[in-house]
Amino acid sequence: MCANMLLESSFGLAQELAELKEKIELLSIGPCCLSGSGSAIFCIIESGDEEIAGQYKHKLEEKLDCKSIIVTNNRW
């Protein structure tokens, strides 16, 4: 699903990105992707399931002290 040509280079420069991605995925939130050169790590979840998204957000903050935002479809 995710193909980022800069992923390995980004991880080489900032090992903490690779570690964070692995920790997030170990929380069973789902596969995560790195945007561009690593400005964001994101996970895509089932559309419209905002309750689950909120639970994942809470889990990230509680387990990893990681701030996150929930972005929903703008339904254009």
Image (cartoon, rainbow, N blue to C red):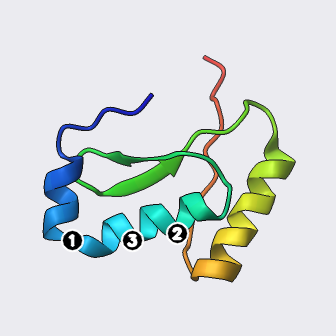
Residue 62 x, y percent position in the rendering: 70, 81
Q: Amino acid at mark 1?
A: Ala
Q: Is residue 4 left or right of residue 61?
A: left
Measured Cα–Cα span from mark 3 to mark 2 = 6 Å
Provide the residue designation for mark 3: 19
49 over 17 or under it: above or below: above
Quarter of the image with the C terminus is: top right
Give residue 42's position: percent from left, percent from top.
Answer: 49, 49
Left or right for 32, reference 45: left
Q: Which residue is mark 1?
A: 14
Q: Secondary structure at mark 3?
A: helix
Sequence order check: which comes first, mark 1 or mark 2? 1
Nearest the viewer among 41 and 20 is 20
Task: Indicate left or right for 23 with 29 as reference.
Answer: left
Q: Is residue 10 above or below residue 20?
A: above
User: Residue 23 — which label?
Assistant: 2
Do the residues under discs 1 and 3 have CB atoms within 8 angstroms? no
Q: Quadrant of residue 66?
A: bottom right
